[in-house]
Every structure is written in structure tokens, then in C-alpha cells.
Image (cartoon, grey):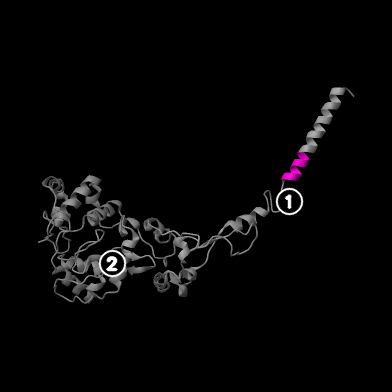
Amino acid sequence: MPKHIARLVLLMVVFGAGAYAAKVFFTPDSFYAYGHYRGNSVAQIASDKPKYMGSRSCEPCHADLYAQWSKGVHHGVDVGKVVQCEVCHGAGGSRDAGGKFEHVSTGAEHPKDLKLVVPSDTLKLCPLCHEKIAGRPAEQRQIDIASHAGTQQCTTCHNAHSPRTIVAAVAPSGQTGRGDAGKAGICAPCHGGDGVSTNPAFPSLAGQHDAYLANALKEYRTGARENVMMSATAKALSEADAQSLAAHFSALKRRSAAAALSEKDLAAGRARTTVCAACHGASGVSGNPLWPSLAGQPKDYLVAALRAYKAGTRKNELMAGVAKGLNDADIEALATYYSSLEFH
């Protein structure tokens, strides 16, 4: 055999032996134990997962919040739905078991070594479970985000630890209406104790036509108008309650909550009122008791309503036709103008 051939064969043997030795040395024993990957990686990944400590671990430091949660809909033990604190705030502990399938107690824990998250953008968090989606079980509370509260954070109205609870203070009414004001307290958190909303996402009821208010409650009760919060409220009222509430709020006085505007700003909105005046009045006061007055309504509410009509998420054929002809600048100008008017 020629020398160069012998050397080449020897070199190949040396490389082969080295490659085999490297394979044996560097390949873990668990390789291919459960397929074409390192078997022990499953246990290692499991041990690195966060450790959930349960809501009971929160009670010693957060007794008040725990009490709210335990009495709220997120603690629905009777229906088998319990949303633990760590779903929103993150895991209370971590593991460092070193590749063992164990529920170990080692690793950082709150409150000693971990700082849990306090969600600030509830508009992204809450819809993960509550956004209206086709196919989602009807038993799950669902909302259409655009028409429900626009860009308002969920915590503007809802206590995060007991979401059915409205967090706004129920202000006592300083006005005297007619009709029975006894049920008015259920409206106050959103629409104000005196019928003047302090939340820009919700309309004021003071001075509104009683026929319009009574009809709106009827439509919420029958499902002709859709809004999760209003539908639930309306269904809890009798026809007599609705009539009394409508009479009460229509007799109250409404004031504009908007800051004084320049004539230039007013002129921009006034020029566009021709599309609204026939139904809602040039001064924002409707001459038809079945149509709402717009004067003094919160600007954000008016903007959200017009956008909802334009998008079709709020149903009304007449308003949909009007809103489709408005661009963003038109909507902004109209809302600014009507919100600045005093209601007489």
C-alpha cells in the first residue's frame, strides 16, 4: 500500500475516533430518551416554572383587598370559577429545584424577595376574559369595548377585586326632582347624584326628556339597546320604577361641565350642527320628547357615542346614517360645541 494512502486512512481513523469520543463526552445520557431532544430538559424546564402560592398567601398583608375579592364574582366557588390573585398580579414564588419534578419551597418568594405586578392598563387585562367574542360562553360576562366605555380604564367604574362593585362614590342629590327618587341611588355612581355625570364617559340625565329616559330604560330591559351595565340595571327595575326615575331626572337642572371655549372653537362646532339640529335642536335642546337633548353632555361621551354609531356597534338607523357622513374632525367639533352649551 502506498505511503500516502496509509497516512490518509490513519488520519481518517484518528478523526473518527475523536468524533466518537466527543459525541460520547458531550451528549447527555438522557438524549433521545423521549424523542430527539434531551430528556432531562423536561424536568429542568418544569423546575424553572413559577410557583403559585394561592390567594390565601395574600390575606395576611392585604386583608381588606382579600375580603373584597372573596366576596366578589372572581371568587365564584359555587359556579366553579375562582380567579386567583396571581392571575392578575403574577406568581408569588419561583422554583430552583435543579431539574427535579418537585413542588419545592426553595426560590424567591413574595413579599420577601419578589415584587408582584400591579396592573395599570386594565383596558388590556380585563378584556382577556370579558371582551365580546363569538363562541365565548354566554354565561361569561362580555362587553363590546368600543361602546361599553371607550378608552376609559375598567377601574374607573369597577373595583378590580370585586368587579361588579361600582367604585364611584354615590353622591347625594342636592336637587329636588319630581317622581320617586328612591331608586335614583342605583344611577348615581355613573350619572351623578344630581343627575350630572362627573365621569366624562357617561351621560348626564338631569333635564333630559322623561319620555326619552323611560323609553331608553325600556329598550335596555328588552334588549333593543345593548350595554351590559345598563341592561342589568334596567332589568332590575319595574315599569313603574322606570317612569318614576325618568320623571325625577327630567325635573333636575343640568349644567355644563366644560370649560369656557373661544368663539373660534364654538364656531367650528356650530357650523356642523345642521346635521343634528332637526332632531336635537340647534341649541342642543330637543323639541321632541323622544329624542335626547345634547347640551351640556360630557364631550367624551358624545365622541364615543358618535363613533359607536359610525362603527355600527350602537344601533340606530337614523344615527348611523348621520354618523357615517362625519369624519373625526366633525365628531370632535360637534362634541366640543354641544358639551359647552348650558342646558335651559
Name the kind of residue labelled 1 in the image: Asp
Question: Please, what secondary structure does the residue beneath circle 1 have?
Answer: loop
Left or right: residue 9 versus residue 106 is right
Disc marking residue 29: 1
* Residue at x-position 31% and y-position 64%: 157
> Pointers 2 and 1 in contact (CB under 8 A)?
no
Question: Please, what secondary structure does the residue beneath circle 2 have?
Answer: loop
Left or right: residue 308 versus residue 105 is left
Image quadrant containing the C terminus:
bottom left
Q: Is residue 303 above or below residue 130?
A: above
* Residue at x-position 17% and y-position 63%: 290
> Front-most of 277 and 335?
335
Residue placed under numbered mark 2 in the picture: 168
Q: In the rendered structure, does residue 52 fall within the stretch colored magenta?
A: no
Q: Position of residue 128 (x, y in %)?
A: 43, 58
Q: Position of residue 294 (x, y in %)?
A: 17, 58
Image quadrant containing the N terminus:
top right
Distance (Cα) linking label 2 and label 1: 62 Å
Q: Earlier in the sequence, mark 2 or mark 1?
A: 1
